[in-house]
Each structure stands twice: as C-alpha cells, then as structure tokens.
Amino acid sequence: MRKNVLITGASSDLGISIASLFANNGYDIIATYLSNLEGVQALKSKLESTYSINVSLFHVDLRDEKRIEEFVHSIERVDVLVNNAAWNDDCDVFDKGQEDFVTAFKVNAIGPFILSKCLYEKLRSVRGSIVNVASTNGIDTMYPESIDYDSSKAALINITKNLAKAFSPEVRVNAVAPGWINTSSTKDMRDTFRDDEEKKILLNRFAEVDEIAQVVYFVASDDASYINGAVLRVDGGISNEY
C-alpha cells in the first residue's frame, strides 16, 4: 500500500515543492487549500500525470475547528502530516491589532495543533510523523512588522516540542525553521532591503524552495527515525547582526 502525505497550504511555492518531492518518492498526496483552487487543481493534474500517484484536494479553513474535525473524519489513512499553511500580513507594528494576532495564531499555530491532535490515532496506527514548517522568525530573527507572525511561529515551535512528548513513541513530531526563501512573495521586495538581508546570511543568498522541501522530506522519512522534538534551522547561516 502506498503511503499518504497530508500537506496544508499545498498551493504555495513551498507547498508545491514539498508535494512534488513526496510524489516523486511514491506518496499519494492529500492537499488542503483555502482560496487557491486553481493552483491546487493545476498541482493535482501535474503530479498525477508525472508520477502516476493520486492527489486528493480538500478545502479546509484552519481557523475552523469543526471543519478540521470533519475533514479528518473523511480521510482513511495518513502516514505523514506537513503543517505548511501560514498567514502573514506585514504592516507597521503600531497598526497591528488583536484581530491580526487572532488570525495569525489560528492559522499558524492553533490550526496545526488541532489537525495534529485529530490525526493522532491515524498517525499512531502507522507510526507516522509530523513536520511543522516554522520559521527562524519564531526563534531570533524578529521583524516588528511581522510581530503577530513571529509570535505564532514561536508558538508552533513550542507546540512541536510538546506534541513530540505527548505523541511519543509512536508518532515523531519535528519542525523545520527556514530563513528567507525565494518565493513569489519575496521576489518583489526592494533591492536594497534584499541586499541587506543577504549580507546577514553566511551563504549570501536566499534559499530555493526545493532546498527547504528536501529537509522537510528527510525529517518526515524513515531516514530520520531517531529525530524527534527537534527544530531544524535551515537559514544558510544567519550571522549575529540580528
């Protein structure tokens, strides 16, 4: 029987790369999306024709606990969960309000917790694994304009460590914490800002999405069978200038 991977936010640049890598390794894909139906439909068509695997699409709002529970009840088997979906809306710190924090925490931390909890029995039955896509913003590369996002990613890292303890030994739970990544959301940033950020990275460049996806796949796989409760930083070597 082929293994299944459930990937939230599958239509994002990183989500597409993660899904493609798992598909290349023979996994069937369970992909969730919020608004980009066209994007996940294109992903489904490409992966099924390229790798001869099955891709199932589900509309899931991670802010809706009842919808998460309904979704989990509708699927039979999950071997790997990748909590990749994220929400971020940068603006001046003094323009941030309660609703920004509520949305960031629901999508980036609470939703992944509820989904992980609801999937525990399915994952336990196959000794599966969970990979949470966190961020160095949740560790020590804070940006005041992203204070709600940064705080929610710090919470996700804490959730990772707590669930690793709660779910052990049957289900491994780890996090991958990328730094800057070349995505559609970073390609339009000001050249001067990008130059300054690249100077803080020992490799002097942003990561490619495939470089992050490779780490996500490794941590989820049996090759990482003794890695649990870890936060793997993938940032090209951030200097101390932060």
Image (tube, rainbow, N blue to C red):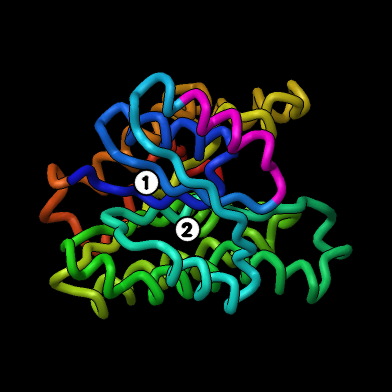
**Label pair 2/1, CB-CB below 8 angstroms:** yes
Q: Residue at (53%, 43%) from the top-left corner?
A: 10
Looking at the image, which residue sits at the far right?
Answer: 95
Q: Residue 147 placed where, x, y %?
A: 68, 61
Q: Secondary structure at mark 1?
A: strand
Amino acid at dot 2: Ile
Q: CA distance from mark 2 to mark 1?
A: 9 Å
Question: Is 42 inside the magenta-drawn segment?
Answer: yes
Residue tagged 2: 139
**What's drawn in magenta, residue-wise?**
35-46
Residue at the (51%, 52%) spot, across then down: 8
Q: Quadrant of residue 125?
A: bottom left
Magenta stretch contains residue 136: no
Q: Who comes first in sequence, dot 2 or dot 1? A: 2
Q: In the depicted view, which residue is nearer to us: 167 or 34? A: 34
In the figure, residue 199 lies in which quadrant? top right
The reply to whether residue 200 is visible in this rendering is no
Closer-to-camera residue (129/233):
129
Give the side of residue 132 with respect to residue 232, left or right. Answer: right
Residue 240, compared with residue 199, is above or below; it is below
The 10 Å Cα crowd at callout 1, few under 14, some 14 to 19, many 20 or more, is: some
Find residue 80 and report its horizontal and vertical position in percent: 30, 53
Is any part of residue 2 visible from this angle?
yes
Q: Position of residue 18 (x, y in %)?
A: 42, 36
Q: Amino acid at mark 1?
A: Arg
Q: Which residue is mark 1?
A: 233
Q: Main secondary structure of the magenta part?
A: helix
Q: Residue at x 34, y 41 (%)?
A: 28
